[in-house]
C-alpha cells in the first residue's frame, strides 16, 4: 500500500503523460491529416469504445474498490482477481465476435480503420489497471505508460505524413494500447498466485459489476455519443473540431482525475475500517483543492480559447476556439462531482445515487443533442455537454446534502471564485491589445498564473510548506547559520 501523497504524485505523472501525447501530436495531426482525418479517427474510435465498455463493464471502479477491501489477504486477493478477470475475459471474447459482426454487416465507409481497432477491444479484455489501483501501486502503471507513450510519439512523427497514413495512426494508437496492457501483466507475478475459481465465484461479481456499469454507459452517452451523433447528423469535420476542443479541456482534468483515482481505494479501505472522520477530512480538503484548480483553469480557457485554437491547431480550426470556451464551463461541475463520486458515493456503495445522476445527465445530453446538433452542429453538442455535467453535479450534491456539509464546502470555495473573476477580467482585457498573437497569448498565460497565485498565496503555502523546502536548500542553510 502506498502513501496517498506519493500515489497522487505518481498518478499526476500518469495522467499528464496521457495528455502530453495529444498535446505534442494534436497540432501535427491537425496539419497533416486535417479536420477530416481527426474526425474519421474520432468517429470510428467512438464506436469501438462502446465495445470496450461492454468488455470492461464497471470493472474499473468495481475492481478497484473490491481489491482495496481484500488486499491485506493474499489468498482473498488472488481469488478476487481471477474471478473478476475471468468475467472480463469472457465479455471480451463475446465483444470481439460482436464487433466483427458489426464490421461485416454495418460498417462500409471506414471499414479499414474499424478493422484495425479490434486491437482496442483485445487491450480492454487484458486491462488490469484496476488491480494495481486497488493495491495503491501506481508507480508500475507509470513505468508502463512512460515506455508506451514515448514509443507512441516517435512512431506518429516517423510514420504519419498525410491523410493517406491515417490507417498507420490508427494502428499505432490501437497497437501501442495493447502493448501497454501486456507489459503490465509482467508486474503481476509476485502480487497474486493462481487459484482455482468456480463459476459461482465469477457469477458473484456480475450483479455489482453491472450496477457500476450503468453509470459508465450513461456517462459514455454524453462523452462519446456526441461524436457519433455529430458524425451521423452533421459531418466528420465538425467531429474534428469537437475532438480537438475536448483534448484541450482534458488537460486541466488530469489533476482531478488523478486525485479521484488515488483517493477511491484509500477511502474504500478507510470506510471498511470505520475511519469516517478521516474520510470526511479527505473530502473537504479534496473539494477545496479541485475547485481552486478548476475555477482558474475554466476561466483561463474561456479568456484565451478563441485566440489559442488557431495558433495551436492551425487557422482551419478557428471554430475549435469557440468550442473550447464553451466546454471550459464544465470544468467546475466535473471537478465537484468527481470528488463526491470517487470519495463518497462509490466507496460508500451508494451506487443508486451515482446511477440516477449520470442517467439524468445522459438523457439531458441526448435530448439537447437531438434538438441542437442539426442546427448548431458542434456548438449544439457543447451546450448539451454543459447541461449534462451540471445536471450530474446538481443531483449528486442534492442527494448527499444531509450526509456531507455541502454549505461548508461552498463557503470554503467561494473566495476562489471571486479571485478567479479578478484574474479573468485582467487576462480577457489583454485580448484588446493589438500585438503578435503568440506574444499576447504568452503574456495572458503568465499574467493569469501570476495574479491567481498571488491572490491565493496563503492557500498555496498551506499546500506546499515552503519553509521546509527553503531549509533544505544548502545556500539558505549557510545564511541561516550566519
Image (spheres, rainbow, N blue to C red):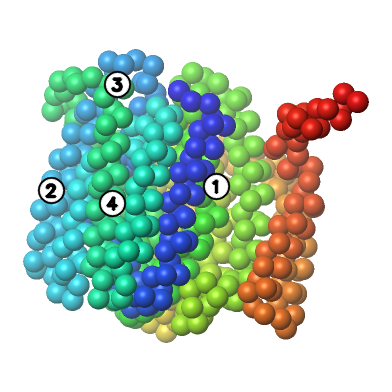
- Closer to the camera in the image, 32 or 91: 32
- Closer to the camera in the image, 400 or 466: 466
Q: Is residue 196 above or below residue 425?
A: above
- Crowd tier of the residue under label 2, counting other residues whose Cα lies within 10 Å: few below 14, some 14–19, many 20 or above: few
Q: How far is disc 2 from disc 4 in space, using C-alphas?
A: 22 Å
Callout in the foreground (1, 2): 1
- Indicate which disc residue 255 carries: 1
49 lies left or right of 194: right
**Residue at 23% over, 68% down:** 167
Q: How far is disc 4 from disc 3 in space, using C-alphas?
A: 25 Å
- Indicate which disc residue 94 carries: 2
Q: How far is disc 2 from disc 3 in space, using C-alphas?
A: 30 Å
- Give how far across and how far down residue 262 sits, in percent: 49, 36
Q: Quadrant of the C terminus?
A: top right
**Callout 2 secondary element:** helix
Q: Give the labeled residue for mark 3.
A: 190
Q: Is residue 384 above or below residue 60?
A: below
Callout in the foreground (2, 3): 3
- Indicate which disc residue 176 carries: 4
**Residue at 75% over, 30% down:** 474
Amino acid at each position: 500500500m502506498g502513501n496517498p501523497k506519493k500515489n497522487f504524485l505518481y498518478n499526476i505523472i500518469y495522467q499528464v503523460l496521457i495528455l502530453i501525447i495529444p498535446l505534442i501530436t494534436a497540432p501535427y495531426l491537425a496539419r497533416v491529416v486535417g479536420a477530416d482525418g481527426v474526425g474519421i479517427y474520432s468517429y470510428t474510435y467512438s464506436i469501438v469504445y462502446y465495445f470496450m465498455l461492454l468488455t470492461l463493464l464497471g470493472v474499473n471502479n468495481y475492481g478497484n474498490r473490491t481489491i482495496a477491501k481484500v488486499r491485506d489477504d493474499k489468498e482473498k486477493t488472488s481469488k478476487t482477481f481471477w474471478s473478476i478477470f475471468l468475467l472480463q475475459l469472457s465479455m471480451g471474447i463475446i465483444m470481439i465476435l460482436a464487433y466483427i459482426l458489426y464490421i461485416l454487416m454495418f460498417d462500409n465507409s471506414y471499414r479499414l480503420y474499424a478493422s484495425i481497432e479490434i486491437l482496442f477491444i483485445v487491450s480492454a479484455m487484458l486491462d488490469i489497471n484496476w488491480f494495481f489501483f486497488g493495491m495503491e501501486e501506481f508507480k508500475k502503471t507509470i513505468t508502463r505508460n512512460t515506455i508506451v507513450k514515448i514509443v507512441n510519439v516517435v512512431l506518429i512523427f516517423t510514420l504519419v505524413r498525410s491523410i493517406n497514413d491515417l490507417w498507420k495512426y490508427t494502428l499505432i494508437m490501437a497497437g501501442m494500447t495493447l502493448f501497454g496492457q501486456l507489459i503490465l501483466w509482467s508486474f503481476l507475478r509476485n502480487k497474486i498466485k493462481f487459484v482455482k475459481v468456480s463459476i459461482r465465484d465469477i457469477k458473484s461479481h456480475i450483479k455489482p459489476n453491472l450496477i457500476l456499469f450503468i453509470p459508465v454507459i450513461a456517462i459514455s452517452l454524453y462523452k462519446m455519443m456526441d461524436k457519433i451523433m455529430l458524425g451521423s447528423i452533421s459531418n466528420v469535420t465538425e467531429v474534428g473540431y469537437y475532438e480537438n476542443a475536448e483534448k484541450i479541456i482534458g488537460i486541466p482534468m488530469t489533476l482531478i482525475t488523478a486525485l479521484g483515482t488515488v483517493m477511491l481505494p484509500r477511502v474504500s479501505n478507510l470506510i471498511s475500517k470505520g475511519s469516517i472522520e478521516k474520510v470526511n477530512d479527505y473530502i473537504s480538503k479534496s473539494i477545496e483543492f479541485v475547485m481552486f484548480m478548476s475555477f482558474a483553469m475554466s476561466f483561463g480557457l474561456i479568456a484565451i480559447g478563441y485566440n489559442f485554437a488557431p495558433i495551436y491547431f492551425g487557422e482551419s480550426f478557428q471554430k475549435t476556439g469557440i468550442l473550447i470556451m464553451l466546454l471550459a464551463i464544465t470544468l467546475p461541475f466535473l471537478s465537484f462531482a468527481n470528488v463526491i463520486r470517487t470519495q463518497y458515493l462509490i466507496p460508500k456503495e451508494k451506487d443508486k445515487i451515482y446511477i440516477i445522476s449520470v442517467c439524468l445527465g445522459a438523457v439531458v445530453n441526448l435530448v439537447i443533442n437531438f434538438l441542437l446538433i442539426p442546427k448548431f452542429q458542434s456548438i449544439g453538442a457543447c451546450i448539451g455537454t454543459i447541461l449534462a455535467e451540471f445536471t450530474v453535479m446538481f443531483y449528486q450534491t442534492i442527494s448527499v446534502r444531509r450526509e456531507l456539509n455541502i454549505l461548508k464546502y461552498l463557503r470554503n470555495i467561494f473566495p476562489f471564485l471571486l479571485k478567479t473573476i479578478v484574474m479573468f477580467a485582467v487576462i480577457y482585457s489583454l485580448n484588446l491589445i493589438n500585438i503578435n498573437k503568440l506574444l499576447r497569448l504568452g503574456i495572458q498565460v503568465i499574467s493569469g498564473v501570476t495574479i491567481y497565485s498571488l491572490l491565493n498565496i496563503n492557500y498555496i503555502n498551506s499546500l506546499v510548506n515552503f519553509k521546509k523546502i527553503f531549509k533544505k536548500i544548502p545556500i539558505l542553510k549557510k545564511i541561516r547559520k550566519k
